[in-house]
Image: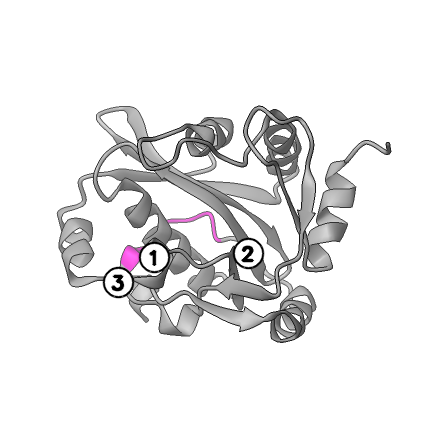
């Protein structure tokens, strides 16, 4: 079997498919191409009022790409409501390589010098593929998501792919669209150059 490389992974994402493992201990990867694709429309992003209060209090320090693999390992952790995850060592290896190449990114929330939450994903053109998030304290991953959206907006991104829509993401405005609609939007985003702004971006940009 041909080994999966970061180049092959990028080609797959550009075609609208993505890999998942059945469990974190399963070394095999499976290509996923859902009929209904989850996206989070950037122009309709909604921040719940209670979360706005948290953002104003600023209980976390938010960083970009300072602990990428740690974020991935956090996303792969089990939890009481998540007895298993789809992120295995092969996915970690591939995305860490893409992070070194400047294509995969993590948004991290820190508190008292400790990583307490975050998310990671992949950028191609003006499309960002959000892969997973985790939280070890209340609102840590939600704050990371708001900061990601703020950064995507000021950086000229058009598409935030969430793969699937969970109840958690639906609160922020995530929707499902048919595969063909998704592929059309993806093609437009891939034809548009964009680069993630690495400067200071206020969270309020997510509301614009």
Q: Secondary structure at mark 3?
A: loop
Q: CA distance from mark 2 to mark 3?
A: 19 Å
Looking at this view, is 30 or 124 the one in front?
30
Callout in the foreground (1, 3)? 1
What is the number of the mark on residue 206?
Answer: none
Callout 1 secondary element: helix
The residue indicated by pointer 2 is 128
Residue at 47% x, 27% y: name it. Answer: 73
Closest to the camera, between mark 2 and mark 1, is 1
Front residue of 59 and 137? 137
C-alpha distance separating marks 1 and 3: 14 Å
Q: Residue at x 14, y 57 (%)?
A: 50
Q: Residues within 10 Å of mark 3 (few under 14, many from 20)?
A: some
Q: Is residue 154 above or below residue 10?
A: below
Query: Which type of secondary structure does the marked residue at label 2 adopt?
Result: strand
Disc 2 crowd rating (10 Å Cα; few below 14, some 14-19, many 20+) is: many
The reply to whether residue 157 is in sight is no
Magenta-highlighted residues: 197-203
Q: Which mark is residue 167?
A: 1
- Residue plotted at (77% across, 36% down): 5
Say which label, 2 or 1, has the lower sequence index. Answer: 2
Residue 165 is left or right of residue 13, and the answer is left
Q: Does the image show residue 109?
A: yes
Pointer 3 residue:
47
- Pinpoint residue 25: horizontal percent, then vertical percent: 57, 24
The mark nearer the N terminus, 2 or 3, is 3
């Amino acid at each position: 079997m041909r080994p999966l490389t970061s180049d092959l992974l990028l080609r797959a994402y550009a075609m609208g498919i993505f890999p998942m493992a059945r469990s974190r201990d399963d070394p095999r990867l499976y290509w996923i191409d859902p009929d209904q694709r989850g996206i989070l429309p950037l122009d309709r992003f909604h921040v719940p009022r209670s979360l706005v209060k948290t953002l104003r209090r600023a209980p976390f320090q938010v960083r970009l790409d300072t602990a990428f693999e740690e974020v991935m390992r956090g996303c792969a952790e089990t939890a009481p409501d998540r007895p298993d995850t789809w992120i295995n060592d092969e996915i970690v290896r591939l995305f860490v390589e893409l992070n070194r190449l400047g294509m995969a990114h993590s948004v991290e929330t820190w508190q008292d010098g400790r990583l307490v939450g975050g998310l990671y994903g992949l950028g191609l053109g003006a499309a960002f593929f959000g892969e997973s998030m985790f939280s070890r304290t209340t609102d840590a991953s939600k704050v990371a998501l708001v900061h990601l959206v703020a950064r995507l907006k000021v950086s000229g991104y058009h598409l935030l792919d969430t793969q699937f829509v969970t109840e958690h993401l639906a609160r922020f405005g995530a929707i499902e669209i048919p595969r063909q609609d998704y592929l059309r939007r993806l093609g437009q985003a891939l034809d548009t150059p964009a680069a993630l702004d690495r400067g200071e971006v206020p969270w309020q940009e997510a509301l614009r």
